[in-house]
Image (cartoon, coloured by chain):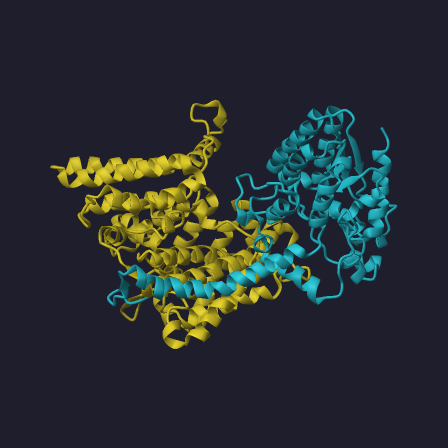
Amino acid sequence: MASYIFYGLWDWRFLSLIFASSIVDYYVGILLPKAKSKARKNSILALSVVWNLGVLFIFKYYNFFIAGFSELFSLNADEYVFSSLRVILPVGLSFYTFQTLSYSIDVYRDRIKPSKNLLNFLCFVSFFPQLVAGPIERARNLLPQFDKERKFDLELAKDGLRQILWGLFKKVVVADNAAVVVNTIYASPEDHGSLSLLYASVLFFFQIYCDFAGYSDIAIGTARLFGFRLSKNFNIPYLSRSVAEFWQRWHITLTKWFTDYVYGPLAKNSKNYLVRTGALFVSMGLIGLWHGANWTFIVFGLFQAFTISIERIPVTIKGKVVNINYYLTKMPLGLTVIYSFTLIMTSCIFFRSENLDMAFFIIGRILEGVPSEPFSLEIGWRVLFIPLLILMEYFTRNQDHPFVKIESKTGRVARWAMYYLFIFFIFRYAGPKEEFIYFQF
Amino acid sequence: MPDPKKSSSISSFKEILKRFVRPVVLFFIPVVIIATVLELMVAKIPSTYSLVGEQLEQEAENIEVAVFGSSQIKNSINPEFLTKNTLNISSSAQHHNTDYKLLQGVVDRLPNLKTVVFELSYGHLEVPHNSKYYWKRPVFLKYYGINTFDRATTPADSLLYMSHPGFFTTQLFDQYLRDSLPAFNRFGFDTGNYKGRFKRLGFDVDSIMRDPLNISRRESLKILEYNTSYFKEMLDFCYDRGLSVVIISPPTFANYSEKRDLNTLQRRDSVLAELKVNYPGLRVLIAETDKRYLVTDFRNGNHLNPDGAEKFTKQLDSLLNTN
């Protein structure tokens, strides 16, 4: 009920959609084990796939494909039956449809037992902390937590509050301040030189990271207050040694989803480089498209697929088959981080740009070495919150968040002083309010 | 994350209160106290908003002119130089959608309102409207009693400090720890506001012209289409109520005006020309390139200082007094 109220506060009309999605997959889950033949099983699963992808298509991609189709055949979409729809994108649609779809597929594959409790299943689909922007939870992790009796877990709740604090710092202090620079410079890239554009692009990476990872921290922390454990979604992605590793550290639950349900079935454990590369391009292209109905997102995904495919090219040296990834793991961390960060940041330019022309213009202008007018940092010394974030995350890199072990290492006074300091940062140095970027997906 | 195998679960409600709720409440008490003190201190700071709010409350029956717009208007219209009692309800970064909500909020409270002044500066029609996160909404609610949230408000919506902690902390520092306090007149106009880029450059024209300045040159026809139709709706609203409308754009200095995108400018001028035809009696004062304004009249390329404001306000006054 709380989750439905939470969602309904945004737009109550779309409650029916999330309810319908839940009902479809709940009954698909009930019917699948009862199916007597493979064909029957397939057709029941098809119902879930068609429903979930259909909803996603209508609300998120219909206009994009109609526009593309019309452009391809030089048609005026408005004159034809398939005219564009005036629909708004329901918040969190991409997240909960993937969650329900994976449930049905997992039941189909006999990886989980179907839920027999409709109420718990509705809670699983609509669980409010992660409903609108993930992490995308698997039924095998979250659903059993609804099924079992819950007791208040003191340590989990305290840790949840700490993680919420860390998430708020990332979002309000780092992401929202970075957004000031990014919005200003990306609003008129033609007025800015190479250095300014590079600066804005680097900041955009940290903006999107702190925006999304900050939300994930808040979501995970909130869930912990209620005794739920959600999956980790980020693991210091800016310290990746390669683009391939980046995707094991960035939006981890989405990467795992596509690995399990798209890449895996396409590659089928093949050792053939071409087969794996083909599966990679399809998966990454779809990951790009998942982010939004725009060519910029598709190119964002394909660009990363291209770089990963290069990293994976097998080369035989002295009888041993290796690839660039192998060498990247042997090189100093600093060098490999610069390598992967440069590529990731470049792909993020596509992510942030309104269209491909703008993205190519910005990349070209950065490479041209256009002198920048003496530019200010825009946010002044607040930019130093980024190195502070990096240092804190680096030195606590094997933990869920930097405050995890604070209780065992410090006394209450020091601990509370630290919390108050971060609350002060959040109030005093909050950037202008910005909606979470991933709400739109 | 705590070890999942290590249980720290508590089933007694009393125990939860003692070991979790009580420390959390204790922890947040200082935060709440400090936030409350800051809120009270912010509410006591004299500001343009508080003074405009007072004017709105005390002089509502006498106000004949209401001026809406952004910081350019806030800095260029000093109502003390206008013959008619005028409410300048402009503020920085305030766009047409906010102007319209404020107008709708005040129109019934001003029985003698006859004229409405809107801003239509260069680029105004191709800049997106204020987003739903425009931080001044609590300010408008608190001081003007106008709901610009597009939803029912809650008590939290009136909290000023929380609406923009960074901004209000600076205001508190200025108010209580620095000497240079604003010199507001009763209309909320800061008559001592001479600080700015031009003053820092010693009003030296060569230095000013060499000084880097980025202005929006981004063309956006979609926004133009939307903003134009929205602006017409605002004009219709005024005309339906028998209010006369004046459209203004204050002077800018050459370092600003020469950097404007000519296509954007031309589109704005076309819209203006069309409005003049379709809205009889519409008066327009575009002073963007008025050479009578000297470098010493400006704070920066597109904001006048109080001297420039006096000149421009008198110019507007002449227009308001013509039929």
Q: Residue at x 43, y 52 (%)?
A: A303
Indicate the position of residue A263 as horizontal and vertical percent values: 30, 50
Q: Residue at x 84, y 49 (%)?
A: B308
**Does residue A340 appear anywhere in the picture?**
no
Q: Quadrant of the N terminus of chain B?
A: bottom left
Quarter location, residue A119 = top left
| Residue closest to the eye, B311 or B87 | B87
Q: Is residue A264 left or right of residue B212?
A: left
Q: Is residue A276 left or right of residue B220?
A: left
Q: Quadrant of the C terminus of chain B?
A: top right
Q: Is residue A259 left or right of residue A305?
A: left
**Does residue A205 appear anywhere in the picture?**
yes
* Colour that chain A carries in the picture: yellow
| Residue closest to the eye, A340 or A395 | A395
Q: Residue at x 26, y 46 (%)?
A: A120
| Residue closest to the eye, A410 or A174 | A410
Q: Is residue A431 left or right of residue B176?
A: left
| Residue closest to the eye, B33 or B237 | B33
Q: Which chain is cyan?
A: B
Indicate the position of residue B202 as horizontal and vertical percent values: 83, 62
Indicate the position of residue B275 as horizontal and vertical percent values: 73, 28
Numbered-mark total: 0
Q: Residue at x 50, y 66 (%)?
A: A422
Q: Which residue appears farthest toward the front when viewing the image?
A: B14
